[in-house]
């Protein structure tokens, strides 16, 4: 491209982006159009990708197109495989995009649309994309080694141990939180429960089709499965309007929690791949399709955001979760801005598929940008709702009151008018008995999504169908994460226990399978049960805990990345990973301090336990006190782990920079690529 | 038109990869098996060992 034209085009992108971000940031009063967020995000991503990621690739990572990747050198047709870059991109995106970027931004919308949007954009461009990019490159240069292996080799055994502990902690808390999101979305909802229940026979049918009728034709089976799921949504309406059937599928939160725990144990312990694999494929199909559809819906309809830029809850008194913008907005939104969990994917399957080092930028940095865009869509879906409706759905009864009249009065007093009649009409329009106290983020997201879809396709008459489609979409792929996650955690526990007593590590020995499955289900079951019984809705305590755990893993990943950069003698550029690292340390330390020691019982776990001890004792009080103390202990252990890995890494950096320690990295030796364009 | 066809081919290849159809094709090639119920069962068994250990993000 002609240089003047190049300057003109990128200058224009910069100007438009600055104007859009400015509009989003400084506009107050009247509602703004969602397109401002879309334009701001598009320009930020374009500039970040074109300039910042290119700078990192050239100056720090010294990406080398002639260096053979492990996919080429170790190709075995199974794990290591030279793959087209777009295919790797799709694979990587499908692996990193879960319910996190949908739920977190919806919950953080209680502060208004502005904090979440700014964090998602800045966090992704300067932290999340950078983390995924550099970890992917470092893993490729180490034969596709995992984050825990790299942490052990580069920062010392402690780093590896902390990374391992963080992964287990995150998996346990994540599984509990997402299970709670499903419980809150499906409780007392015969329509939603019926639809999700129907996915079991549908998955079995798909399994039979795949194994017996057309072996291996997964795309075909997924299309049939998707059509059957749509029929199940339609059938859910019939079920909800037919009293005897509705009675069967109207389940309380505790019943749903027990059913989910039984399901997860069975999925982990039994060879039920006839059910699990087809369900996994179906969930991926629905996920990719729905995200694409939502993006089109937002672009075509460009709805108005009714949520203000900033709400009064920036002071920490929010009903959805308690705590001030800093640090709580930054741990509530993890996956859309930076997620430690991504570093596991970037050092898992993906580095074994990359054909050339030059493609890592697009896959690592680019896929995280796409995930961040999903988070922006979630912010839009939450903020198109009237704020009164948003708070009525997301506020627990323990905060706004037990009755519809009390809840609407409380929320209206906050300056977000809503009436019981409005909420009743809205619930009726989506085929639910009530939408009050549907905490967890999923129902609010589903309602926002239904609002956007119904305005572009089908009008108000199909609002209920769209709402239940959205609930099904979230619940389906959360359940997939539950069964797959429980299985992964079981394998990790077995691997660890195998060091103590060999037979426990054998994945085919049933006593070990049953014991470790029970152990892992019990571990997250405790937190799920706690969430179900919590008068504040559970998500208030558990989501921040998950956010802290996830950001802890990001801290470990950034420590590893900074250590390698220092060892590569590029310390003058270490700020690229060091600044996000210090930011995350500040966020996790401050959040942990508040969660453990804050005097406000809605924020501090110990204050909560103290308040419960002083209040009139009920049957549940001892359990609630135990839960609060358990949460405090888990938070303290997590933050201690951050401190240890940070100290260990800092010792490495100081040692190398002062010359007292040798800067030795564990990169695989250089081998010239033999790949041709046609081969890729 | 050619470019559109190329985009379509890549999209299909991506979907086939994400949905493991390509992995199954590679498995058939590697094991010199013909597509059949037995081959697909063997493929699923192999996938279970490698894929079930891979975490997926939240």
Image: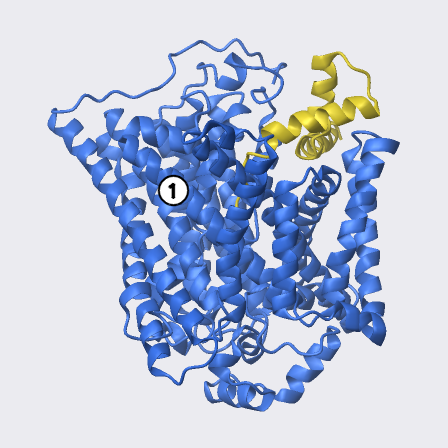
Chain colours: A blue, B yellow
When asked about the image quadrant of residue A23, the answer is: bottom left
* Observer-nearest of A12 and A190: A190
* Observer-nearest of A240 and A90: A240
Q: Residue A330: percent from the left, percent from the top?
A: 38, 58
* Count of residue discs: 1
* Observer-nearest of A501 and B24: A501
Judge left or right: residue A450 versus residue A594. right
Q: Residue A285: percent from the left, percent from the top?
A: 71, 44
Q: Which residue is drawn at 45% across and 85% down?
A: A414
Q: Residue at x 57, y 57 (%)?
A: A179
Q: How crowded is mark 1: few (under 14 residues within 10 Å), some or many (20 or more)?
A: some
Secondary structure under the numbered disc 1 in the rendered image: helix
When asked about the image quadrant of residue A168, the answer is: top left
Q: Residue A368: percent from the left, percent from the top?
A: 49, 43
Most distant residue in the right direction: A213
Q: Residue A521: percent from the left, percent from the top?
A: 54, 50
When asked about the image quadrant of residue A471, the answer is: bottom right
Q: Is residue A598 above or below residue A367?
A: below
The residue singled out by tag 1 in the image is A165
Q: Quadrant of the C terminus of chain A?
A: top right
Q: Which residue is drawn at 65% across and 66% down?
A: A255
Judge left or right: residue A111 versus residue A515. left
Q: Is residue A256 above or below residue A229?
A: below
The answer to whether any part of residue A679 appears in the image is yes
The answer to whether any part of residue B58 appears in the image is no
| Chain under numbered label 1 | A
* Observer-nearest of A11 and A356: A356
């Amino acid at each position: 491209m002609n240089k003047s034209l190049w300057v003109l085009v990128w200058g224009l992108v910069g100007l438009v982006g600055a104007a859009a971000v400015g509009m989003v940031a400084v506009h107050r009063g009247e509602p703004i159009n969602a397109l401002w967020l879309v334009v701001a995000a598009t320009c930020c991503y374009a500039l970040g990708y074109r300039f910042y990621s290119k700078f990192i690739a050239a100056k720090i990572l010294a990406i080398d197109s002639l260096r053979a990747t492990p996919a080429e050198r170790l190709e075995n047709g199974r794990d290591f495989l030279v793959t087209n870059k777009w295919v790797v991109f799709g694979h990587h995106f499908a692996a990193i995009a879960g319910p996190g970027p949908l739920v977190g931004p919806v919950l953080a919308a209680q502060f208004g649309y502005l904090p979440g949007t700014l964090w998602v954009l800045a966090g992704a461009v300067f932290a999340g994309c950078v983390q995924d990019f550099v970890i992917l490159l470092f893993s490729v240069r180490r034969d596709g080694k995992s984050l825990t292996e790299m942490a052990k080799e580069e920062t010392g055994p402690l780093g590896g141990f902390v990374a391992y502990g963080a992964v287990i902690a995150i998996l346990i808390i994540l599984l509990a939180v997402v299970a709670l999101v499903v419980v809150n979305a499906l409780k007392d909802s015969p329509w939603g429960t019926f639809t999700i229940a129907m996915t079991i026979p549908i998955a079995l049918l798909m399994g039979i089709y795949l194994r017996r009728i057309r072996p291996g034709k997964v795309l075909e089976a997924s299309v049939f499965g998707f059509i059957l799921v749509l029929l199940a949504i339609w059938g859910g309406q019939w079920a909800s309007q037919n009293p005897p059937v509705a009675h069967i599928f109207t389940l309380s939160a505790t019943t749903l929690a027990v059913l989910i725990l039984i399901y997860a144990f069975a999925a982990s312990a039994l060879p039920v791949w006839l059910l699990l694999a087809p369900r996994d494929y179906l969930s991926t199909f629905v996920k990719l399709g729905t995200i694409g559809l939502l993006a089109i819906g937002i672009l075509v309809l460009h709805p108005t955001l009714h949520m203000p830029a900033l709400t009064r809850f920036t002071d920490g008194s929010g009903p959805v979760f308690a705590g001030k913008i800093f640090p709580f907005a930054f741990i509530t939104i993890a996956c859309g801005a930076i997620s430690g969990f991504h570093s596991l994917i970037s050092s898992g399957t993906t580095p074994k598929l990359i054909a050339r080092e030059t493609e890592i930028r697009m896959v690592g940095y680019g896929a995280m940008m796409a995930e961040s865009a999903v988070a922006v869509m979630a912010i839009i879906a939450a903020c198109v709702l009237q704020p009164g409706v948003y708070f009525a759905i997301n506020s627990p009864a323990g905060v706004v009151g037990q009755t519809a009249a009390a809840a609407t009065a409380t929320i209206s007093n906050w300056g977000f008018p809503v009436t019981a009649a409005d909420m009743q009409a809205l619930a009726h329009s989506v085929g639910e008995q009530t939408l009050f106290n549907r905490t967890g983020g999923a129902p609010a997201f589903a309602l926002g999504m239904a609002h956007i879809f119904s305005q572009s396709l089908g009008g108000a008459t199909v609002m209920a169908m769209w709402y239940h489609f959205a609930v099904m979409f979230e619940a389906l792929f959360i359940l997939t994460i539950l069964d797959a996650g429980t299985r992964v955690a079981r394998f990790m526990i077995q691997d660890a226990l195998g060091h103590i007593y060999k037979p426990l590590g054998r994945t085919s020995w049933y006593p070990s399978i049953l014991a470790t499955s029970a152990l892992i289900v019990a571990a997250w079951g405790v937190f799920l049960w706690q969430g179900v019984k919590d008068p504040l809705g559970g998500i208030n305590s558990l989501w921040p805990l998950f956010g802290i755990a996830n950001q802890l893993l990001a801290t470990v990943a950034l420590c590893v990345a900074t250590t390698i950069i220092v060892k590569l003698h590029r310390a003058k550029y270490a700020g690229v990973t060091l600044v996000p690292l210090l930011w995350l340390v500040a966020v996790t330390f401050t959040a942990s301090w508040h969660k453990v020691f804050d005097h406000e019982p809605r924020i501090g776990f110990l204050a909560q336990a103290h308040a419960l001890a002083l209040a009139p004792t009920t049957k549940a009080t001892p359990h609630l006190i135990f839960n609060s103390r358990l949460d405090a202990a888990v938070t303290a252990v997590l933050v201690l782990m951050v401190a240890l890995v940070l100290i260990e890494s800092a010792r490495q950096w100081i040692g190398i920079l002062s010359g007292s320690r040798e800067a030795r990295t564990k990169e695989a030796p250089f081998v010239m690529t033999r790949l041709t364009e046609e081969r890729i | 038109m050619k470019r559109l066809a190329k985009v379509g081919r890549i999209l299909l290849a991506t979907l086939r990869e994400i949905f493991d159809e390509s992995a199954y094709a590679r498995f058939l090639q590697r094991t010199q098996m013909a597509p059949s119920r037995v081959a697909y069962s063997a493929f699923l068994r192999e996938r279970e060992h490698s894929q079930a250990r891979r975490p997926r993000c939240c």
